[in-house]
Image (cartoon, helix red, strand yellow):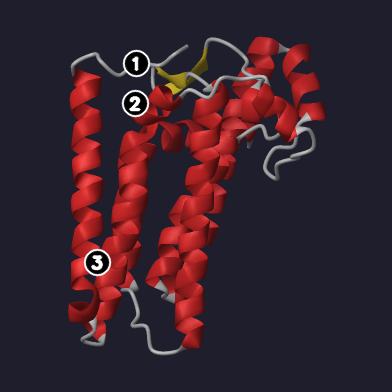
Amino acid sequence: MTDLFNKWGNFFFHTRNYLFPAFILTLLFIWPPVALTDAASCFVMSAGLLMVALGQLFRITTIGLDYIVRGGRNRRIYAEDLVTGGLFSHCRNPLYVGNLLIAIGYLFVAGNWGSIIVGSLSFLAIYRLIVHSEETFLGEKFGQAYTDFCNDVPRWIPNLSGFSDTVKGYQFDWPAVAVKDGGTIFMSVMVPVGLIAWKLNLTNQLGNYQTVLLIITVIMTCAFLTMRFFKKSGRLKSMR
C-alpha cells in the first residue's frame, strides 16, 4: 500500500502544474459560480478571498525567508538539501499549506457547494499523497535528521511560537519572491477577479464594478509583465 501511495504521490507531484488548473476548471464547469444574492453568498465569497490571501501570504513568507529548492528527477520527488529554517521551522509543508488555501479559496469565491465539497476533499487527499511520497523520500535520504525534524515541526498546522525571532534572523528576499512566485501572485489576484466578474454578471451587476475590476486587471498585468522583463533580462535576482 505504501508503494501505491508513493506512486500516486509522485504522479501528482510531477503533474501538479498542469493537472490542478485543469481540475479546477473542470469543477467550475460542472458546478459553475453562483450569483451574489444574499448575505450568505457574500460571506462564502469573502471567506474564499481571505483563504486565497492567507495562502499567498504563506507562500511569500516561505520564499522570502528560506526557500526550499525541491523538484522532480526521473519523474520522482527529489531534494538536494533538508531545509529546516525560515517558515519550515514552524511547518514542514508551508508551500503546500499555501497552495491548499489558494486552491480551495478559489472554490469558495465561486461559491458553489458542489465544487467546494468535491474540490476540497480531492485537494486534501492529493496533497496528502504528495506529502506521503516526499516524507518517504526525505526519510530515506536524510535519516535521523529528518526524523528529528518531523518530531519537532508539525506537518500541516503551523506552530508560530517564536516566529518573530525567526523573521529577525533573515533578510527578507523580495527579489526571490518576485522571481519565484510572481506568476502565482498574479493568478491569486486574477482568478478571483474573473470569478467575481462572472458572479456579478449573473445578476446584471457587472457594469457597476467593471471599472474597478479593469483597473485591478491592468495594474496586475503591468506589474507581472514588468517582473517578467526584469527576470528575463537578468536584472532581478535572488539575494541568496
Marks 2 & 1, CB-CB < 8 Å contact: yes
Q: Position of residue 68 (x, y in %)?
A: 53, 22
Does the image show residue 199? yes
> Considering only order in the chain, which callout, 1 or 2, is on the residue closer to the N terminus?
2
Task: Please state which amino acid type lies under the numbered disc 3.
Answer: Val
Q: Is residue 103 above or below residue 90?
A: below
Disc 3 secondary structure class: helix
- Of residues 68 and 155, the one nearer the viewer is 68
> Considering only order in the chain, which callout, 2 or 3, is on the residue closer to the N terminus?
2
Q: Residue tagged by mark 2?
A: 179
- Of residues 27 and 94, the one nearer the viewer is 94
Q: Residue at x 72, y 34 (%)?
A: 163
Task: Please state which amino acid type lies under the numbered disc 2.
Answer: Val
Q: Residue at x 64, y 30 (%)?
A: 87
Q: Is residue 37 above or below residue 79?
A: below
Task: Please state which amino acid type lies under the numbered disc 1.
Answer: Lys
Q: Residue tagged by mark 1?
A: 237
